[in-house]
Amino acid sequence: MDLDGSSSLVVPEGSGSIPAGHVQARRHTAYYHFTQQSLPACKPVLTPTWVITVFLLMGVLFIPVGLVVLHTSRSVAEIVYRYDAECVPLSYKNNMVAYIKDSSSPKLCSATLKVNRTMKAPIYIYYQLDNYYQNHRRYVKSRSDKQLLHGLAYNDTSSCKPIQSHNGLPIVPCGLIAWSLFNDTYSFALGSSELKVNRKNIAWKSDREHKFGKHVYPFNFQNGTLIGGGNLDPNIPLSDHEDLIVWMRAAALPSFRKLYGRIEEDLHADDVLDIKIMNNYNSYSFGGRKKLVISTSSWLGGRNDFLGVAYIFVGSSSLLISIFFTLLHMKSRPYGETNYSTWNKRSSSG
């Protein structure tokens, strides 16, 4: 204990340690400066010139970027064809649910689509579903990731309710997502020659190698009285069922597209595609819509004008704000001019 009542640490000579009282005082000082907001900080003065310059630079930068992005998006050639209503016979137009549930009625549908612009390979084929809520809480939770990886070796499938077992035997893969697998199919022909659709490598590599077992095979799948969607070949492991892997990655929005395959040859303008569609999937019970999408891609991905329009909107708004502030600044008093202060006006008037 020192004479002034403060205490210090007892340390060997030459250690260079700071006394405990000094440390506590420094901490108290730092805490005081922090709570009183008196720490060193960058406090820029937002002068009119500085604000106008920032908005002007944003406009100059954002508008060209938006134009480039919008041009890139518009360069993507895309064909969208809605077929859920077109592929229903006239006799079932007033009761489409009965048509899709009637196994005796033919589900094959034919359509012709004209290519308006040259489409360079690879050409991506998507199926689009609207008004389909894959993000429903009960639907998203009805799956077992460990079973997808380990198969029958993993017994706890309680998370797959209500599609977890049939006749006392487990279902692989279990759950509502796998049970509702999309099962419409498409084939394409150009004149008399058939276009091959490559359905390999349409799923993420990480999903194929780390989330779906290479030695896990479908078991007791779609054997109940209520069939949800597509079936799976029990002789092919889950890691090779790429259509299932794509489907199991649940979409966040009620309108979504999922990759079906790729056409690996060019299509030219005015080509006419003959398409055969197997209209198997029941989207009529919940008012869903089905579309076939044929699209190329760019360095930004598929066609989406939102990003380019957003850049142009922000840039244009920034330019307008900078012009408005410039006009306002030209008509206002000089910055920091004391002659326009209130007390000066009072003294001059008196």
Image (cartoon, helix red, strand yellow):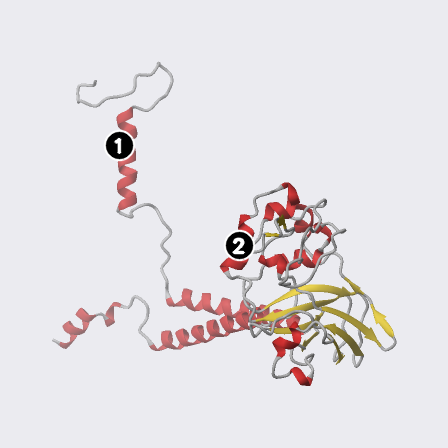
* Distance from Cα at disc 2 to Cα at disc 1: 55 Å
| Element carrying mark 1 | helix
What numbered label is drawn on residue 25? 1
In this view, the residue in front, 111 or 228, is: 228
Q: Name the quarter where the N terminus is drawn.
A: top left
- Circle 2 sits on which residue? 141
**What mark, if any, has residue 171 been given in the picture?**
none
Q: Relative to residue 258, is residue 34 depicted above or below?
A: above
Number of marks in the rendered image? 2
- The answer to which of 223 and 22 lies nearer the viewer is 223
Quick one: label 2, few (<14), some, or many (20+) residues within 10 Å? some
Farthest-out residue, front: 167
Task: Name the residue rendered at 26%, 26% in the picture.
Answer: 21
Estimate the x, y position of residue 191 in percent, counting from the top left. 85, 78
Q: Position of residue 85 (x, y in %)?
A: 65, 80
Quadrant where the C terminus sits is: bottom left
Amino acid found under the numbered disc labelled 2:
Lys
Q: Residue at (72%, 55%) from the top-left corner?
A: 241
- Vertical relation: 247 (above or below) 275: above
